[in-house]
Image: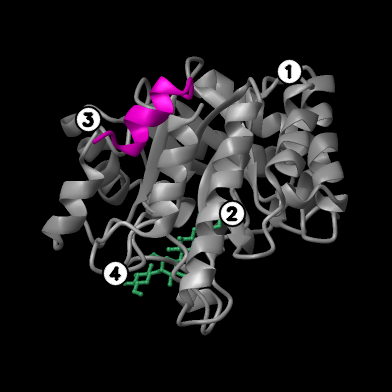
Amino acid sequence: SAQLNELAVRAGLKYFGTALREGAINNDQQYARILGDTREFGQLVPENGQKWDATQPNRGQFNFQSGDITANTAKRNGQGLRCHTLVWYSQLPGWVSSGSWNRQTLESVMKTHIDNVMGHYKGQCYAWDVVNEAVDDNGNWRDNVFLRVFNTDYLPLSFRLAKAADPDTKLYYNDYNLEYNQGKTDRAVELVKIVQEAGAPIDGVGFQGHLIVGSTPTRQQLATVLRRFTSLGVEVAYTELDIRHSRLPASSQASIQQGNDYANVVGSCLDVPGCVGVTVWSFTDKYSWIPETFQGEGDALIYDRNFNKKPAWSSISSVLAAA
Ligand code: G3I
């Protein structure tokens, strides 16, 4: 029977993809086998390997070992690659976040980073998350070293530097909780406009989609918020989808609800021309960032810990098959 990426492509999306956990791929054959099935996942994104702390832990010292795990796996399997991420306050080494910079010196640090990292993966990335999580949950600009030095000028600057480093990849702004269409979403809309009005290139907005079972907006609400961005002339995608149970173990009713929530998210992407694909932030409950961050929550993915397909998998496959 058909698998998720096959169904997604038939339904008109470009891909159904997953994050790759660098620590798991070489030690877990079952994980590697499902992840490498192009019928299931048409695109991969490194969970951590391309971030600043992995790629340039010390100034001028570049390391692509971890990022290459995903790039090489994708190449070997004939899968696409999403690339993540360049300008982000988190997983940013101390030499950057606590350096004493002015515009000139920080721009030069950003340029060196972007040139080297994008240069290394040039021609391989469908898209790059150029700027990640620049807005806080209250809708304010998120405090970070870039904002302190440049105010919002770091936004167009980042996209300009990215375009110069790899002109042929899609340049994305990527964030979470945009799905709820509140103040944070308004600010992200403003961000896109700031970049566009500065004459800098931006091609897409990534909805991370770190959602909660039972609190996920409806398919129609989600389509409405996606359209706020596509109407600005950028594409959109769900880039880090997972829908966690806030109480564990999940009841069978909660598992069905989780499936319905996944179907609403994927369905909203099908409803909006300009929504290009869906990526889950890992695919098995065996490997997820959630339990470390939200104590007692989790089981947010589409396969269980033993690699059995969950109701969420079936709900996604049904909504894709119906398109
Ligand atoms: O670097 C150390 C390594 O030296 C050590 O051996 C290892 C042992 O635990 O820990 C390593 O650091 C961990 C890192 O992942 C790499 O595995 C951190 O403790 C851990 O906090 C970090 O978590 C990642 C998180 O981003 C960091 O912000 C998660 O795996 C990753 O799933 C998560 O992904 C983010 C997206 O990039 C952006 N959107 C939100 C999403 C979830 O937070």
**Amino acid on which disc 4 is placed:** Arg
Position of residue 61 measured from the top left corner of the image (x, y, whole percent): 37, 49
Helix, strand or loop at mark 4: loop
Q: Earlier in the sequence, mark 1 or mark 4?
A: 1
**Amino acid on which disc 1 is placed:** Gly
Closest to the observer: 267 or 89?
267
Please say if the residues under marks 2 and 1 sit with CB atoms less than 8 Å apart.
no
Residue 282's tag is none
Residue 261's tag is 2
Q: Nearer the viewer, mark 1 or mark 4?
A: 4
Helix, strand or loop at mark 3: helix
Q: CA distance from mark 3 to mark 1?
A: 30 Å
Q: CA distance from mark 2 to mark 1?
A: 27 Å
Q: Earlier in the sequence, mark 4 or mark 2?
A: 2
Q: Residue tagged by mark 4?
A: 305
Which span is picked out in magenta?
1-13
Q: Residue tagged by mark 3?
A: 75
Helix, strand or loop at mark 1: loop
**Amino acid on which disc 2 is placed:** Asp
Please say if the residues under marks 3 and 2 sit with CB atoms less than 8 Å apart.
no
Q: CA distance from mark 4 to mark 3?
A: 27 Å
Q: Residue at 67% of width from left, 57% of height from top?
A: 216
Q: Residues within 10 Å of mark 2 (few under 14, many from 20)?
A: many
Q: Residues within 10 Å of mark 1 (few under 14, many from 20)?
A: some
If the image is split into quadrants, where does the N terminus sit?
A: top left
Report ligand 1 position as a quadrant: bottom left
Position of residue 59 measured from the top left corner of the image (x, y, whole percent): 46, 51
Residue 233's tag is 1
- Let me know if residue 7 is in the magenta part: yes
In this rendering, the answer to whether 296 lies above or below 87 is below
